[in-house]
Amino acid sequence: MRFELTGSTWGEEEKQAIFDVVKSNRFTMGPRVQEFEEKFAAHFGMRYAVMANSGSSANLIAVASLFYRKDNPLKRGDEVIVPCISWATTYHPLHQYGLKLKFVDVDLKTLTIDVAELKKAITGKTRMVVAVSVLGNPCRFDEITGLCAENNIILFEDNCESMGARFDGRYTGTFGFVNTFSTFFSHHISTMEGGLALTNDKEMYNLLKSIRNHGWTRGQDEDSPVFEKRDDDFYEAYRFILPGYNVRPSEIHGAIGSRQLDKLDGFLKVRRKNAEHFVGLFGNDKRFIIQSETGESSWFCFTMIVNPEWTADRKRVLQTLRQAGIEYRIITGGNILRHDVIRYYNHEVTKSTNADIAHYNGFFVGNFSEDIRDKIDYLHETLATL
């Protein structure tokens, strides 16, 4: 038996969506992207969604937009608190826009930011907190939102790994001033490549749209708060107002997204059923520390950290999995502080003890949007031989 990291979520509906776009002969961003954006925002109870060509690009345009707000924009040198564990492109745009990153440790069981450490890290210089719900597992948003409100701090939510998760009955990816999602192949829904930013703020919405699309005015709302329209339509069609990018999705991505979103709730039910089986088998296994669910996880995958008190090391565990045809991967990107790129960041570290344990002792195995309980049994049987 093989146990892969992920599997396709596409059916005939997605293939038909592609064919419909091909027949339309309209491939660049247009009505199908807009339809998906509107459906996505409505699904998560938000006012606005902006699709980009990846979750990484969604992070990029979201960070950029915060620098061009009329009131209290971010500035180079401002301090932003981030967890030690996330994907690389959570951090890169923050660095690229000149922010100072203050790294805070994670909780070893949940793998999300340690709220006690976050409280200690906040100072009068802190302008923003980036909350990352790691691999489907929600952050402690009751405490995080309270801390941000008390200290007048922007909450940026990177929800790229956790679509469909909930905390206190509310979807993750809706707690922040701006929130990002990914629709990459291995994620909860897939548009091949893609991502979205969600916000309830009209100014942010229009900033996101402009920065996604060359920094020009095309596609802005009639009452956009980010520029004043002039009478010269010839000039207005190519009027650049912000230093933007071209990170637009295609119509194919939007069309697939609408079909995938229709299936999301069903995908989540299956993922959670798989997770129930996994936790039943490994929840009391003292050899491993598994992710402790906060709220209602959307279970991107199954993390396993080799307990430092166990005599076996990760190398031996991974060799056993490899020989059995069980795929594995580092937890998210591991502790970013242990990657070469950190030498380029303006940063400080408060503590990273748990992030290091996850980095050096951890790995994850896959979860799918289909029943894989037999594969989880096979994983359990394989690890029983150690």
Image (cartoon, helix red, strand yellow):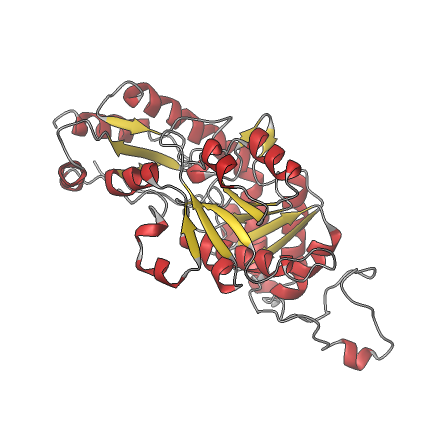
Q: Is residue 316 left or right of residue 307?
A: left
Q: Residue furthest right?
A: 231
Residue 83, percent across and down?
44, 43
Q: State which quadrant residue 359 falls in.
A: top left
> Which residue is at the front of the view, 149 or 211?
149
Q: What residue is rendered at 39% in x and 26% in y?
A: 292
Q: Is residue 298 left or right of residue 361?
A: right
Looking at the rendered image, the quarter that the C terminus falls into is top left
Residue 85, percent across and down?
39, 44
Q: Is residue 248 above or below residue 377?
A: below
> Which residue is at the front of the view, 109 or 380?
109
Q: What residue is rendered at 16% in x and 37% in y?
A: 324
Number of numbered callouts drawn: 0
Looking at the rendered image, the quarter that the N terminus falls into is top left
Question: Could you tell me if residue 164 is visible in this image?
Answer: yes
Q: What residue is rendered at 72% in x and 65% in y?
A: 219
Q: Is residue 247 left or right of residue 42?
A: left
Q: Is residue 107 above or below residue 233?
A: above
Residue 146, percent across and down?
62, 33
Q: Is residue 306 left or right of residue 87?
A: left
Question: Could you tell me if residue 327 is visible in this image?
Answer: no
Residue 322, percent across and down?
17, 42
Q: Is residue 35 above or below residue 308?
A: below
